[in-house]
Amino acid sequence: MGDEAVASDESEFWERRHDLSLSPITEEDVAKQGVGRERHLVLLAHLNDGDLITELQPIRDRLGDFECFEPITEQNLHITVKVFGNVVENPSGEAEYSLEEERELADELGSVLDDFLPFHIEFPRYNLFPTAVYAEVDDDGRFREMNRRVCGLSNVPVLDRDTVGFIPHLTLGHFTQQSGYERLVEYLETNRRLDLPTTRVEQVKFVALDFSKGRFPPYETIETYQFE
């Protein structure tokens, strides 16, 4: 499996961390990925737990001290459940939707998520992808089950990241260049255990992200699915 591919297990990239073929997301990459993705549809759990956000602040600040890294904004802290695709004027591919299809998808998501109950998640340690540093998520398989159900809908594209190995994670930021990577890895090795508060997930959101607005784009909430 190439480094640019998804991993089937969250330990894969960590085990190869010193030999990893990094895939930094440069500012040029950010500009390119914004083209045609002004309305990018995603199902996610937005994290707004005050205690968690407070504890994440010094972590994001410390990671931001490394020259190869850009920390995520507080407003964008989330765990992705499913990536769908883009709303476009004339959809033709399986990962393209019209505004009418967006609304239909919002309704269908409600039908497969309506029996979920609130659950707790923990963030035990740092890990990494070739593009990012993240906090691992211990959720007793709840996000994986959500992903599985959503992928069963007829108008939802199933990606490698869904079938090869769905890994719920809290992205802490992106690699932006190669220089300084080894120093950051050494820091992660020394400080790998995270002491973050357990948080309760009571809802997920179907959102539209505007990737023309930068690296960590704002998102518009289309529908919120409350767990009761």
Image (spheres, rainbow, N blue to C red):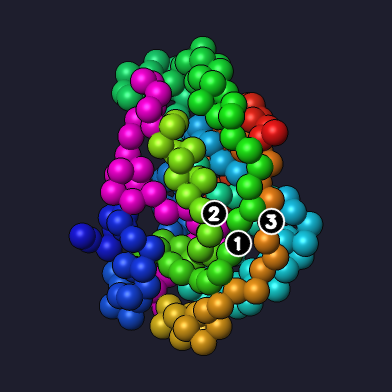
Q: Which residue is mark 3?
A: 199
Amino acid marked by disc 1: Glu
Task: Categorize mark 1 by other alpha carbons within 10 Å: few (<14), some (14-19), many (20+).
Answer: some
**Which numbered tag is attached to residue 139?**
2
Apparent side of residue 121 relative to residue 150 in the rendered image (left or right): right
Residue 1, given in percent of the width and then of the height, sits at: 20, 60
Q: Quadrant of residue 135?
A: bottom right
Residue 142, given in percent of the width and then of the height, sits at: 52, 46
Q: Which residue is mark 1?
A: 122
**Badge 2 or badge 3: first in the primary sequence:** 2
**Badge 1 or badge 2: first in the primary sequence:** 1
Q: Residue at x 43, y 67 (%)?
A: 128
Task: Categorize mark 3 by other alpha carbons within 10 Å: few (<14), some (14-19), many (20+).
Answer: some
Extreme residue in the top direction: 100
**Badge 1 or badge 3: first in the primary sequence:** 1
**Callout 1–callout 2 Cβ contact below 8 Å:** yes
Q: Is residue 183 visible?
A: no
Residue 185, given in percent of the width and then of the height, sits at: 44, 80
Q: Nearer the viewer, residue 130 or 48?
A: 48
Q: Residue at x 59, y 35 (%)?
A: 116
Q: Residue at x 39, y 49 (%)?
A: 166
Amino acid marked by disc 3: Thr
Q: What are the residue bounds of the magenta stretch?
A: 151-179
